[in-house]
Image: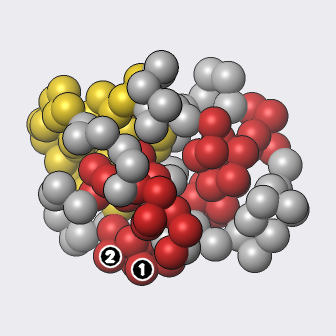
């Protein structure tokens, strides 16, 4: 799934909430292979809107423009992880995410729309 599709799928409420995210700090940008595909990964440290926590966001783009994403925030875990995994747009993380990945978010994202959390949205606009 292309990054432009994930941006376009992101609901207006999440886009508006992304404005409250403090500017992300780019931690690393490097070439990385995922499976047999080559691409570039951007890793950010993003402060929560409340200012109490930091989240790790990762966006990986292959040479064809397809994206895989990850964020350590609870919204991503319980609203988006399952849908992004089904769409092939998840930059896999196993530890601590088994519960979120095994059940669809029937109440929070019943249509299983793959989109970005506010932290990923804020970061994606900087690529």
**Viewer can see residue 34:** no
User: Residue 15's x, y, as percent?
Assistant: 43, 66
Answer left or right for 52 relative to 44: right
User: Residue 119's x, y, as percent?
Assistant: 41, 46
User: Residue 109's x, y, as percent?
Assistant: 74, 65
The number of numbered badges drawn on the structure is 2
Q: Which residue is mark 1?
A: 8
Q: Which residue is mark 2?
A: 4
User: Residue 78's x, y, as percent?
Assistant: 71, 45
Q: Nearer the viewer, mark 2 or mark 1?
A: 1
The residue furthest left is 30
Alpha carbon separation for disc pair 2 and 1: 6 Å
SS assignment at label 1: helix
SS assignment at label 2: helix
Residues under numbered marks 2 and 1 in contact, where contact means CB atoms less than 8 Å apart: yes
Q: How is the image coloured?
A: secondary structure
- Residue at figure coordinates x 67%, y 23% from the top left: 96
Q: Characterize the local packing of mark 1: few (<14), some (14-19) or many (20 or more) Cα atoms within 10 angstroms.
A: few
- Residue at figure coordinates x 20%, y 32% from the top left: 25
Q: Characterize the local packing of mark 2: few (<14), some (14-19) or many (20 or more) Cα atoms within 10 angstroms.
A: few
Answer left or right for 103 relative to 75: right
């Amino acid at each position: 799934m292309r990054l432009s599709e994930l941006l376009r799928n992101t609901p207006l409420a999440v886009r508006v909430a992304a404005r409250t995210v403090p500017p992300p700090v780019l931690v690393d940008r490097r070439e990385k292979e995922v499976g047999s595909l080559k691409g570039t990964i951007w890793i950010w440290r993003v402060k929560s809107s409340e200012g109490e926590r930091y989240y790790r966001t990762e966006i990986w783009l292959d040479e064809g423009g397809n994206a895989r994403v990850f964020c350590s925030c609870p919204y991503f875990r319980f609203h988006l992880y399952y849908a992004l995994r089904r769409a092939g747009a998840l930059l896999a993380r196993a530890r601590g995410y088994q519960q979120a990945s095994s059940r669809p978010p029937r109440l929070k994202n019943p249509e299983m729309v793959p989109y970005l959390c506010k932290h990923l949205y804020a970061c994606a606009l900087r690529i």
